[in-house]
Image (spheres, grey):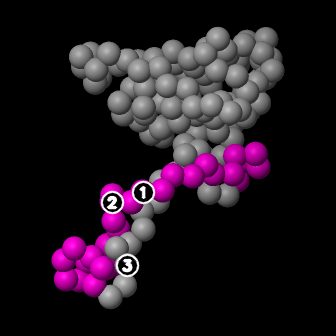
Amino acid sequence: MADIIKAVNRAVPVLQRSQNFTNADAAQGDILKVADSLGYPASHITIEATGGALKVCFNVWQTVFNNYGPHGQGYLYGTDHLPNVTSGHSFLTNTQSGVGVNPAGSVNIEAGETYTIDKVLAVSDIQLVLVSGNFDVWVA
């Protein structure tokens, strides 16, 4: 399992950035880091499965921030209950079952089908849970 990042040119205006991932870039179990590639979470996604089925999960990496702590360990008086944004911890959610912490669950795409998300979900990453053929993932 690897994190796949294909960075785009940051000189390109934000609304014109896009990236394409294929089976030459990633394999089963890999995670396509969309936000790290584009510089922002994608809202337009098209996934084509050719020659076999594909199962994907969206937004599998989650980041939590701990509070400053009890008894005045915050920087200012009364900030103990606030999150410490410098101490984020990332973890991988349970993606095999498609339920639980992962809010979008898993999506099964049959051979020859195209799955599209258009301004419904901000996608930061895509995990390729099951790959049995070629695929083409376009994000913007």
Q: Earlier in the sequence, mark 2 or mark 3?
A: 3
Which residue in the protein does label 1 denote? 88
Apparent side of residue 9 relative to residue 120 in the rendered image (left or right) = left
Q: Is residue 91 visible?
A: yes
Q: Main secondary structure of the magenta part?
A: loop
Q: Is residue 136 visible?
A: no
Which residue in the protein does label 2 denote? 85
| Residue occupying the point 69% across, 51% down | 94
Q: Local crowd at mark 1 within 10 Å, few (<14), some, or many (≥20)?
A: few
Q: Earlier in the sequence, mark 1 or mark 3?
A: 3
Label 2 sits on a secondary structure element that is strand
Q: Amino acid at mark 1?
A: Gly
Q: Are marks 1 and 3 in contact (CB under 8 Å)?
A: no
Q: Nearer the viewer, residue 75 or 62?
A: 75
Which residue in the protein does label 3 denote? 69
Label 1 sits on a secondary structure element that is strand
81 is within the stretch colored magenta: yes
Q: Amino acid at mark 2?
A: Val
Q: Local crowd at mark 3 within 10 Å, few (<14), some, or many (≥20)?
A: some
Label 3 sits on a secondary structure element that is loop
- The part of the chain drawn in magenta is 72-99
Relative to 87, residue 94 above or below: above
- What is the spatial separation of the Cα atoms under label 2 and label 1, in whole angstroms? 6 Å
Looking at the rendered image, the quarter that the C terminus falls into is top left
| Residue occupying the point 70% across, 46% down | 95
Q: Are marks 2 and 1 in contact (CB under 8 Å)?
A: yes
| Residue occupying the point 64% across, 11% down | 24
Could you tell me residue 68's position as x and y percent? 34, 73
Relative to 97, residue 33 above or below: above
- What is the spatial separation of the Cα atoms under label 2 and label 3, in whole angstroms? 13 Å
Apparent side of residue 112 relative to residue 42 in the rendered image (left or right) = right
